[in-house]
């Protein structure tokens, strides 16, 4: 998968870029592959510390005005960086750009086409649902000065480190959604880090704590938008935790977000929760 990801970067029609690869303590032959078959890379090796710390290492080494991310199990299209460049010039160097994703099985359907975008004052103005309007970390391109000023990704070994950063960048000036063309192909498989439940529990609790501590920008005006996103993230993690028999973690997350779940009318979820707990407890016996 890493070979495919790197090949997709080297096939870019826009050539003014550097490739930084962060090996986060892998044990699958990645180190040997990079040494033998990947010249022209800036490779960083570190002990396993999780996705946030790995991306921060890459950010620290980056020299570009913008930083774009690609996970090793995904791939860009040949026009991805050129599409970002066009949107950056069109909208006056915005802080945050995000593009559309295609499922991996539809990768062959992707075609180059005219860049279609929508620009908002910032990300919080674009939030109107349960999730930020961002199609995952491989869909984003961020201005490096603003990214570094934000502190980068949370360095804890957790999931939702991306949602945490999006919320901390909520008022960064200029948020652009690229509707077409698609900028990356996303592969879904059992090894996806985002499917690990324990790090997801840690990440969901982190979002709750940061919101209650007033870390995220936007004040009272955007409080509802932020908390709706955090509540939805917690709801999905609670359900995943119950499926894994992690009943105490599920109870704790529900207690932390109960008022928000009720506020945003997640009533079917709240009504079903006791029955799901009983089912999870029976499955453990």
Image (cartoon, rainbow, N blue to C red):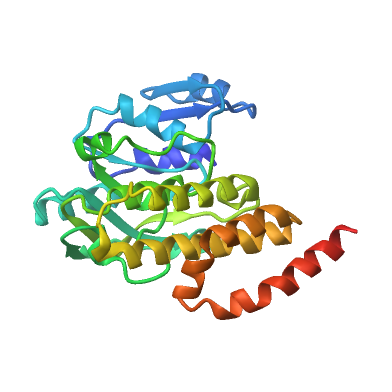
At x 39%, y 58%, the residue is: 135
At x 23%, y 43%, the residue is: 14
Count of all numbered marks drawn on residues in the image = 0
Q: Quadrant of the N terminus?
A: top right
For residue 208, side relative to residue 41 (left or right) = right
Q: Nearer the viewer, residue 146 or 190?
A: 146
Q: Is residue 269 above or below residue 81?
A: below
For residue 121, side relative to residue 99 (left or right) = left
At x 64%, y 78%, the residue is: 271
For residue 251, side relative to residue 88 (left or right) = right
The quadrant in which residue 183 appears is bottom left
Q: Nearer the viewer, residue 36 or 68?
A: 68
Q: Quadrant of the C terminus?
A: bottom right
Query: Residue 214: percent from the left, percent from the top?
Result: 33, 49
Can residue 178 be seen in this snapshot?
no
Q: Nearer the viewer, residue 194 or 45?
A: 194
The quadrant in which residue 68 appears is top left
For residue 14, side relative to residue 157 (left or right) = left
Query: Residue 225: percent from the left, percent from the top?
Result: 34, 66
Query: Residue 252: percent from the left, percent from the top?
Result: 62, 55
At x 42%, y 39%, the residue is: 7
Q: Nearer the viewer, residue 63 or 170?
A: 170
Q: Is residue 98 above or below residue 15?
A: below
């Amino acid at each position: 998968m890493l070979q495919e990801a790197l090949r997709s970067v080297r096939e870019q029609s826009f050539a003014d870029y550097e490739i930084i690869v962060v090996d986060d303590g892998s044990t699958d032959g990645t180190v040997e592959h990079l040494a033998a078959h990947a010249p022209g890379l800036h490779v960083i090796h570190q002990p396993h510390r999780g996705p946030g710390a790995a991306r921060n290492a890459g950010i620290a080494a980056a020299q570009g005005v913008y930083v774009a991310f690609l996970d090793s199990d995904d791939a860009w299209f040949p026009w991805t960086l050129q599409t970002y460049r066009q949107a950056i010039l069109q909208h006056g160097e915005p802080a945050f750009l995000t593009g559309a994703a295609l499922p991996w099985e539809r990768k062959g359907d992707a075609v180059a086409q005219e860049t279609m975008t929508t620009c908002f004052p910032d990300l919080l103005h674009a939030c109107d649902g349960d999730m930020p309007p961002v199609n995952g970390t491989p869909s984003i391109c961020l201005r490096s000065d603003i990214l570094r000023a934000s502190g980068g990704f949370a360095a804890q070994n957790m999931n939702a480190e991306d949602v945490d950063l999006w919320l901390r960048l909520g008022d960064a000036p200029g948020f652009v959604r690229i509707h077409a063309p698609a900028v990356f192909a996303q592969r879904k498989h059992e090894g996806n880090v985002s499917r690990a439940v324990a790090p997801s529990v840690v990440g969901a609790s982190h979002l709750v704590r940061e919101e209650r501590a007033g870390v995220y920008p936007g004040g009272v005006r955007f409080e509802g938008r932020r908390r709706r996103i955090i509540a939805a993230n917690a709801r999905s993690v609670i359900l995943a935790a119950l499926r894994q028999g992690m009943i105490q973690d599920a109870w704790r997350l529900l207690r932390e977000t109960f008022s928000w779940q009720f506020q945003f009318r997640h009533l079917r979820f709240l009504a079903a929760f006791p029955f799901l707990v009983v089912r999870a407890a029976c499955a453990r016996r």
